[in-house]
Structures are given as C-alpha cells and as structure tokens.
C-alpha cells in the first residue's frame, strides 16, 4: 500500500507510522529521516537543504520533493510506503501526484489522525524531559514521575522544552490548520481520505487504523 499519514502535532503520527509500516511490511518515510540521511550522506540535495537550514531559512519544496522521490524509488518501496510529514501543503501534494503518475502508480489511502485541539495541547504541553538524558520522557498526566520534577531513571531534573509550551503548541496548530490541513480536502476530492480517532491507547489506535485501511483497499 502507498499511504500518506496526516494529523496535527501531538496526534502520535510518528508512533503510529512505525507500527503501521511494520504491520504492512512497507518502509516508513519521514521528512526528518529524509533530511538527516541526505545531509549525513552528503548528497547534492542534502547539501542544498543544509545550506538553507544553516542560514535559518525554510527548505524549499523542490528540495524536499526531490528527497522524497529518491527515497520512494529505492527497492524497499517498490510495493508501497508510508509517508509521514510529507506532503505538508497542497503544492507538495500536487508534486507527489505528478511523481507517482510518472511511475504509473497512485496512492491507496490518506490516513487522517483526528485529535481534538485541547487534547493536542494537553499531550504536548504536559511533556517533561530529563536534562541528563532526552530519551527519558514523562507526562504530568499520562506518565508522571514518582517524584515531581525528578526523573525516575537517573534522578535528573525534568523540564518543559520551549517548543512544548502551550503558546508554542497553539502556534504550531495554527501553521498546521493553515498549511497542512488543506491537503485533507485535496485528497478527499480524490476519495482517498480515511479519518480515524487518534484517542486511546497506542495499540487501540493502530488496530483502528489497520481496520480502516483494510476497508479502504
């Protein structure tokens, strides 16, 4: 299957993408991984992206699209892929359609993870990260530490990252509504959108997604 995963920040896209890709035996292709791989390998696209990023500028669509095309052309993506974080806007969605059409393939589904805005804010703003080890992550509501402000694993101080503050989260949501959400209507017009609730336990959401995708085949 060829799937695009969409949803607001805090919807759990990365987590669900990993499980779905494994269950469907297709590669999980995320924008972040594309950038890291191209930059670390020193590809021409990676050099271009790094130059923009080092200058504090957004990487142009054509560079991101070029990376995605190269990744989708690799052997492990012949029978399908799951795109996470791409396309981010209608222009990228149109370019993706053109690229797939050139290879005589098309998307099978666009999985829309739906989460109420207040829940998104609660999920992200409630995160607390250990200063000693960033992989030690807690949540004031869903997975609180035994002692407030102290990491259960190493005893380090827990803090809220700047980009996890409520104001920042709401700004990220505004960007999502303005730039990314319109692709849902774009794909809905093609009959590709499958919307599921992303509330509940991770495995419950994964099962919901798998059931929806099977029904969409």
Image (tube, rainbow, N blue to C red):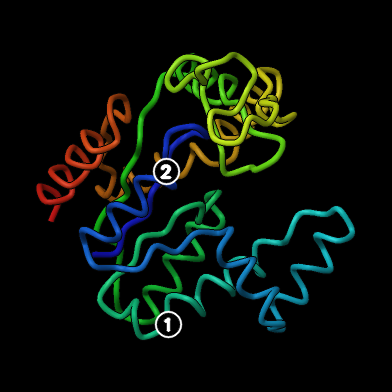
Query: Picture coordinates of residue 180 (x, y %)?
Result: 53, 41
Q: Is residue 45 left or right of residue 102?
A: right
Q: Horizontally, is 188 left or right of 23 in the view?
A: right
Q: In the image, what residue occupies the spot 21% across and 33% down?
A: 204
Nearest to the eye among marks 1 and 2: give it: 2
Q: Position of residue 213 (x, y in %)?
A: 18, 49
**Mark linked to residue 204:** none
Secondary structure found at label 2: helix
Q: Residue furthest left?
A: 215
Q: Is residue 45 above or below residue 24?
A: below
Q: Name the residue beneath numbered marker 1.
A: 73
The quarter of the image holding the N terminus is bottom left
In this rendering, the count of numbered labels is: 2
Mark 1 Cα shell of 10 Å, populated few (<14), some (14-19), many (≥20): few
Tell me residue 191's x, y (percent): 24, 47
Which of the two residues, 79 or 110, is positioned nearer the viewer here?
79
Quadrant in the rendering for residue 171: top right
Image quadrant occupied by the C terminus: bottom left
Between marks 1 and 2, how big is the CA–CA gap? 23 Å
**Which numbered marker is on residue 13?**
2
User: Which residue is rendered at x = 27% and y = 35% of the image?
Assistant: 195
């Amino acid at each position: 299957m060829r799937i695009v995963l969409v949803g607001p920040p805090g919807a759990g896209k990365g987590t669900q993408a990993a499980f779905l890709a494994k269950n469907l035996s297709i590669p999980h292709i995320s924008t972040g991984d594309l950038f890291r791989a191209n930059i670390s390998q020193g590809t021409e696209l990676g050099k271009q992206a790094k130059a923009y990023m080092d200058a504090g500028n957004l990487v142009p669509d054509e560079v991101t699209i070029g990376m995605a095309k190269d990744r989708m052309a690799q052997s492990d993506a012949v029978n399908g892929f799951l795109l996470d974080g791409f396309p981010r806007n209608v222009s990228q969605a149109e370019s993706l359609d053109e690229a797939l059409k050139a290879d005589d393939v098309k998307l099978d589904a666009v999985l829309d993870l739906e989460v109420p805005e207040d829940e998104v804010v609660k999920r992200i703003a409630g995160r607390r990260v250990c200063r000693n080890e960033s992989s030690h992550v807690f949540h004031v509501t869903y997975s609180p530490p035994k002692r407030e402000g102290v990491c259960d694993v190493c005893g380090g101080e827990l803090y809220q990252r700047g980009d996890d503050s409520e104001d920042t989260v709401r700004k990220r949501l505004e960007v999502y509504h303005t730039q990314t959400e319109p692709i849902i209507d774009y794909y809905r017009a093609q009959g590709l959108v499958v919307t599921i609730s992303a509330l509940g336990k991770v495995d419950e959401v994964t099962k919901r997604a798998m059931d929806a995708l099977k029904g969409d085949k």
